[in-house]
Amino acid sequence: MHTILHTADSRGHANHGWLNSFHTFSFAGYYNPQRMHFGALRVLNDDTVAPGMGFGQHPHDNMEIVSIPLAGQLKHRDTTGTEAIIRTGDIQIMSAGSGLEHSEMNGSGTEAVKFLQIWVFPKLRNISPRYDQKYFDPAKRKNSLQVVISPEKNADSIWINQDAWFSLTAPEKGKTIDYTLHQEGNGVYLFMLDGKASVNGQSLQARDGLGISGTEAFTIEALEDADILLMEIPMLG
């Protein structure tokens, strides 16, 4: 097993007043040649947006863009005609494909919205742009793995244009979670949303990230009650 640790306090940071953002990988004004991506995972931003503010309409193409609200609500609009509100428990994915424009605004005028913005390189380029969102019951990830994104077009997860699987888990203190990779050659980027855990002897706390590769399986031990996001993605050679 090979691992790479990105501690919470080692991330890039930009505070624009209306936006307070932490960057695990190089993004915008934060550039670190050692942190360009982890396999097909290109961007992992931990964003807080002030009430009534947000990202105005702007373009994307050939990127799988995932948003995971952690608090508050996010208002989405794009040039496919989609308008939606995304709240805690929802997962949003936008396949930018051949190109579209979108905006992501705080849906509240009084409360901040906190969310993860994640970009994944696509498997197929220039597909038709596509949007989807789905609610996932947090109770179903307690002491178990809840797959929320996968390359399979089924009713239990959201489809992504990549050989990637995203899972959420909320192990209680003292519990273990066994993770077996879905595809040979993939890696997993584990991101601690909250709590403390250990993987292969490496202790992790809130907002730490651990890239894991060169293994078919690993075990997570919860040192405290924890909330964890696991992103399994191709390692791109």
Image (cartoon, grey):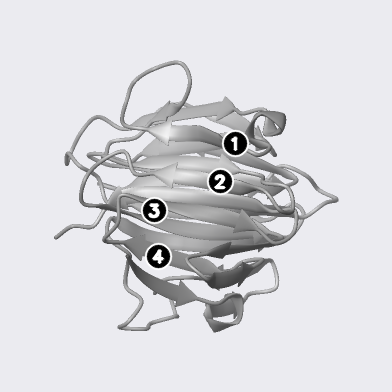
Q: Report whether residue 103 is seen.
A: no
Q: Which mark is residue 119?
A: 3
Going 60% across and 43% down the picture, which residue do you hit?
169
Residue drawn at x 37%, y 83% as measured from the top left: 32
Q: What amino acid is labelled 3 in the image?
A: Trp
Mark 2 is surrounded, within 10 Å at the Cα level, by few (under 14), some (14 to 19) or many (20 or more) other residues, namely: some
Q: Give percent across and percent down for residue 5.
A: 46, 75
Mark 1 or mark 2, which is nearer the start of the sequence?
Answer: 1
Identify the residue under disc 1: 144
Judging by the rendered image, the residue that carries numbered circle 4 is 211
In the image, farthest residue toward the top: 155
* Residue 231 rendering spot, x and y as whole percentages: 42, 50
C-alpha span from label 3 to label 2: 26 Å
Q: Disc 2 vs disc 1: Cβ atoms closer than 8 Å? A: yes
Q: Of tags 4 and 2, which is closer to the observer?
A: 2
Query: Relative to the observer, which residue lies in front, 209 or 97?
Result: 209
Q: Residues within 10 Å of mark 4 (few under 14, many from 20)?
A: some
Q: Amino acid at mark 4?
A: Gly
For numbered disc 2, what is the local secondary structure? strand
The three-letter code of the residue at mark 1 reads Ser
Q: Are marks 3 and 4 in contact (CB under 8 Å)?
A: no
Q: Residue beneath label 2, please?
A: 177
Q: Report the amino acid beneath label 2.
A: Ile
Residue 203 lies, with reference to residue 230, above or below; the image says: below
Mark 3 or 4 closer to N-term?
A: 3
The percent coordinates of residue 209 (x first, y second) are 51, 67
Nearer the observer: mark 1 or 3; the answer is: 1
Mark 4 or mark 2, earlier in chain: 2
